[in-house]
């Protein structure tokens, strides 16, 4: 095994508020499959199994928090809110807040094509982090970590302020203006190899640029651009 592999950055544990007894679990949570493949001769494990485990921990912790926080919520309410909190975009948002992307262990190609800021890589690593915390310290420590890192997102869901379909929300906003604003989505560029394409889209209102975003698909890049536009239009 890679001798330096199980030595994650010292300040990362401070940022997440949890110190691992078994540092190799944290290192594994940060290890993308492309890095593990490139280091297969040293038998470096990736984070996919931890991701599977962490998904269950995440769902249970968020579900329990919703159940406890608002007794008036119906089963349907809680199901919808939990889906918003545990989705890829929410996890990626929480990951960016703690600077997780810069700590990821990626293969060379994945790193070169923007892998440190891909929602999928960030969200998978977050789930793996929760799974690693569960193995390291048990459910109480893992659920506390989930709520510490996701509390703001959870509170926004409870307040009805968590919206993930940014494009639809932006279109509705533009159509509700008097007079309606002209909205246009423009595919600015495509980069990367055919199976690793990165799309960049822009959103314009009345011909003025309001947001730009990237993603692994045109749809994802439009959502990112819409999110940026909404931030400019309603920063609160």
Image (cartoon, grey):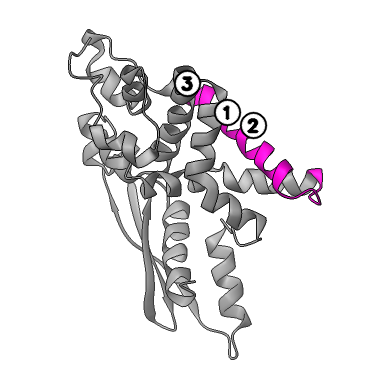
Mark 3 sits on what residue? 137
- For label 1, the crowd category at 10 Å Cα-Cα, with few meaning under 14, some 14 to 19 and many 20 or more, is many
Q: Is residue 59 magenta?
A: yes
How far is mark 2 from mark 3, CA to CA? 16 Å
How far is mark 2 from mark 1, CA to CA? 5 Å
Q: Position of residue 183 (x, y in %)?
A: 49, 76
Count of numbered badges drawn on the protein: 3
Give 90 or 154, whichever is nearer the viewer: 154
Q: Quadrant of the N terminus?
A: top left
Q: Position of residue 26 (x, y in %)?
A: 35, 24
Q: Is residue 191 magenta?
A: no
Residue range of the region highlighted in magenta in the rendering: 51-75
Q: Position of residue 32 (x, y in %)?
A: 33, 27
Q: Main secondary structure of the magenta part?
A: helix
State if disc 1 and disc 2 touch (CB < 8 Å).
yes
Q: Counting residues from the N terminus, which is met first, the one under dot 1 or under dot 3?
A: 1
Mark 1 sits on what residue? 57
Identify which residue is drawn at 32% across, 25% down.
31
Q: Which circle marks residue 60 in the picture?
A: 2
Identify the image quadrant of residue 136. top left
Q: Counting residues from the N terminus, which is met first, the one under dot 2 or under dot 3?
A: 2
- For label 2, the crowd category at 10 Å Cα-Cα, with few meaning under 14, some 14 to 19 and many 20 or more, is some
Identify which residue is drawn at 61% across, 48% down.
84
Relative placement, left or right, of 70 versus 39 is: right
Mark 3 residue element: helix
Residue farthest to the bottom?
A: 179
Mark 1 residue element: helix
């Amino acid at each position: 095994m890679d001798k330096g592999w199980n030595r994650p950055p010292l300040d990362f544990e401070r940022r997440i508020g949890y110190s691992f007894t078994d540092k190799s679990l944290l290192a594994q949570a940060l290890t993308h499959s492309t890095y593990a493949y490139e280091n297969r001769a040293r038998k470096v494990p990736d984070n996919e199994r931890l991701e599977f485990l962490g998904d269950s921990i995440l769902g249970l912790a968020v579900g329990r928090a919703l159940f406890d926080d608002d007794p008036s919520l119906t089963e349907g309410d809680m199901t919808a809110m939990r889906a918003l909190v545990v989705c890829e975009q929410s996890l990626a948002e929480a990951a960016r807040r703690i600077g997780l992307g810069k700590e990821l262990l990626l293969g060379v190609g994945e790193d070169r094509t923007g892998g440190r800021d891909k929602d999928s890589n960030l969200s998978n690593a977050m789930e793996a982090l929760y799974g690693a915390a569960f193995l390291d310290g048990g459910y109480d420590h893992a659920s506390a970590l989930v709520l510490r890192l996701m509390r703001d997102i959870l509170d926004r869901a409870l307040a009805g302020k968590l919206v993930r379909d940014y494009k639809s929300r932006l279109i509705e906003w533009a159509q509700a203006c008097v007079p309606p604003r002209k909205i246009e989505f423009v595919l600015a560029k495509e980069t990367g190899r055919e199976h690793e394409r990165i799309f960049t889209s822009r959103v314009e209102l009345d011909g003025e640029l309001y947001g730009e975003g990237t993603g692994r698909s045109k749809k994802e890049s439009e959502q990112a651009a819409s999110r940026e536009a909404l931030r400019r239009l309603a920063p609160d």
